[in-house]
Every structure is written in C-alpha cells, then in structure tokens.
C-alpha cells in the first residue's frame, strides 16, 4: 500500500505514525509524575515482632503387665514468626554556610598630564629633477 506513494509522502506518514504512537507514553509519564509523593516524605519502617508459640505432644502407652506402667512423653516445640517492616525517614537538613570573597578593585595611582611642548619639525621644499625626453621610434614590421 505504501509502495505506491511518493517517497516524501511515505516518509511523512511513517513519521506521523511514530509521533502518534508515543503520545500514550507521555501521558502515562505525566500521570506518574503527578501521583508521585513529594521528595523528602518517603518513609520506610522496620519492625521485628516475634510471635512465640509452643506445642506440647503427649503419648500414653499402656502395657498389660502385673503392674500398670504409663509412659508419658512431652515434646515441646517453640515456633518464632518474625515480621520485618522497613522504616526510613529522609529529612533534608539545611546547613548554613558563609563564604568570604575577596574581589580586588584595580586602582591607577599614576596620572598622565599632557603638556603643550611643541617639537621642531623639518620641512622640505620642492626639488628639481630632470626627466629624460621620450623618443618615439618605429619598429620594422615582422617578416
């Protein structure tokens, strides 16, 4: 279907499809940023609470003998259940600091005062030069 379209039109359609397909990602990112808790308010709590329990098991054995004998066996069992809950408090702490800055200011202690002292100048007058006369000679024609 796209093969029948000119190259420029086909490129525009592909780029438009890519652009439109990324819009849901931007929407989900905006929702995640909106629902995120503000920084510094995340807290995790760690709590360990053991839950002891014990079990007693008894066994009674009767044996027909001339004298009755009873065997009782108790097996105590201790079961501990630990629950771990993490707690973390992230509290930003501001620490005031002061920084001294030395900024040099340039000063110029020297003052230049112009003085009106004329300096002698040399002046040269026109001089005569001789120019050689121009001689017009004709050349013979080339053979």
Image (cartoon, helix red, strand yellow):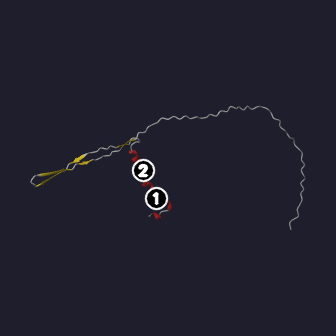
* Position of residue 126 measured from the top left corner of the image (x, y, whole percent): 87, 43
Figure quadrant of residue 109: top right
* Position of residue 29 measured from the top left corner of the image (x, y, whole percent): 41, 49
* Position of residue 67 measured from the top left corner of the image (x, y, whole percent): 10, 52
Q: Are marks 2 and 1 in contact (CB under 8 Å)?
A: no
Q: Is residue 10 left or right of residue 131?
A: left
The residue singled out by tag 1 in the image is 14
The residue singled out by tag 2 in the image is 26
Q: Residue at x 39, y 45 (%)?
A: 34
Distance from Cα at disc 2 to Cα at disc 1: 19 Å
Secondary structure of the residue carrying tag 1 is helix
The quadrant in which the C terminus is found is bottom right
| Nearer the camera: disc 2 or disc 1 | 2
In the foreground, 118 or 101: 101
Q: Earlier in the sequence, mark 2 or mark 1?
A: 1
In the foreground, 13 or 35: 35
Which label number is shown at residue 95?
A: none
Instruction: Check the image and name the residue furthest to the left.
Output: 66
Q: Is residue 109 left or right of residue 4?
A: right
Instruction: Check the image and name the residue furthest to the bottom.
Output: 143
Q: Residue at x 47, y 64 (%)?
A: 3
């Amino acid at each position: 279907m796209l093969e029948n379209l000119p190259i420029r039109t086909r490129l525009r359609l592909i780029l438009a499809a890519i652009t439109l397909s990324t819009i849901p990602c931007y929407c989900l990112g905006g929702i995640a940023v909106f629902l995120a808790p503000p920084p510094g308010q995340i807290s995790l709590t760690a709590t360990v609470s053991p839950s002891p329990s014990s079990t007693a098991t008894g066994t009674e054995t009767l044996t027909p003998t001339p004298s009755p004998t009873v065997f009782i066996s108790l097996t105590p069992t201790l079961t501990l259940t630990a629950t771990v809950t993490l707690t973390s408090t992230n509290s930003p702490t501001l620490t005031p600091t002061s920084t001294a800055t030395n900024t040099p200011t340039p000063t110029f202690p020297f003052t230049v005062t112009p003085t009106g002292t004329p300096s002698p100048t040399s002046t040269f007058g026109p001089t005569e030069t001789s120019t050689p006369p121009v001689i017009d000679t004709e050349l013979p024609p080339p053979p």
